[in-house]
Image: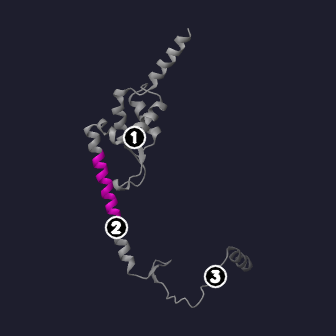
Amino acid sequence: EGNQTIDTFFKAKASTDVPEHLVGELANIIARMRSQSMVAITDEFLSKFPGKGSKKSIGQKIEAIGVKEKRSEEGDTAPYWYLRKEKDHLLTKTTKAHMKDSREARLAAAAEKGKKRKVDDDAEGDENGAIGPEGDFVEFPEYDGEEEPHENKKAFTLFCKATRRE
């Protein structure tokens, strides 16, 4: 009778693991839901394949085949899920094409952002001033360093002056 309990335990544990024939499907879900959380990926997998694993076992499998990191050379602005190199063979052709298009779009956006930033820096680099409160350009005054700058007013001083005026 004791052996039946142990056998039942191991059979129940085995049924909660992700089946090997569905690891490729999980890899494709990870690749397509790159910016999502592990919980969202797990929920997506369970919605497509109900009862094919526990949330815990799916989370462990996600960590085994993928890694979430920010790769600036890929044009990432936030951490994304990437499959480990040895698991790339699990992806379908359509998922690989989707990943390639997504990567090119991110790199193009990063290049455009960098180009815009460079143009803004060049435009402001020649001028010695800033935009004032009314929206007009105001040049910075010349500072020779002989005079000490005025000390900033403290919050308490401003409060006292405001209450005296009342």
Name the spot of residue 162 as percent of width and height, x first: 70, 77
Q: Which type of secondary structure does the marked residue at label 3 adopt?
A: loop
- Disc 2 and disc 1: Cα gap in Å? 34 Å
Residue marked by disc 1: 66
What is the chief secondary structure element of the magenta stretch? helix
Residue type highlighted by circle 1: Gly
Q: Which type of secondary structure does the marked residue at label 1 adopt?
A: strand
How many labels, in total?
Answer: 3
Which part of the image, by quadrant, shows the N terminus?
Answer: top right
Mark 3 or mark 2: name the one nearer the start of the chain: 2
Residue type highlighted by circle 3: Glu
Local crowd at mark 3 within 10 Å, few (<14), some, or many (≥20)? few
Mark 2 or mark 1: name the one nearer the start of the chain: 1
- Disc 3 and disc 2: Cα gap in Å? 37 Å
Q: Is 24 situated above or below 155?
A: above
Q: Nearer the viewer, residue 71 or 153?
A: 71
Residue type highlighted by circle 2: Lys
Q: Nearer the viewer, residue 159 or 110?
A: 110
Who's the residue at 36% across and 27% down the image?
A: 20
Looking at the rendering, the stretch of residues picked out in magenta corresponds to 99-116
Tell me if 99 is positioned left or right of 67 in this view: left
Mark 1 or mark 3: name the one nearer the start of the chain: 1
Name the spot of residue 53 as percent of width and height, x first: 44, 27
Name the spot of residue 66 as percent of width and height, x first: 39, 40
Which dot, 2 or 1, sits closer to the camera?
1
Residue marked by disc 2: 116
Q: Nearer the viewer, residue 12 or 162?
A: 12
Q: Is residue 108 magenta?
A: yes
Q: Which mark is residue 151?
A: 3
- Disc 1 and disc 3: Cα gap in Å? 55 Å
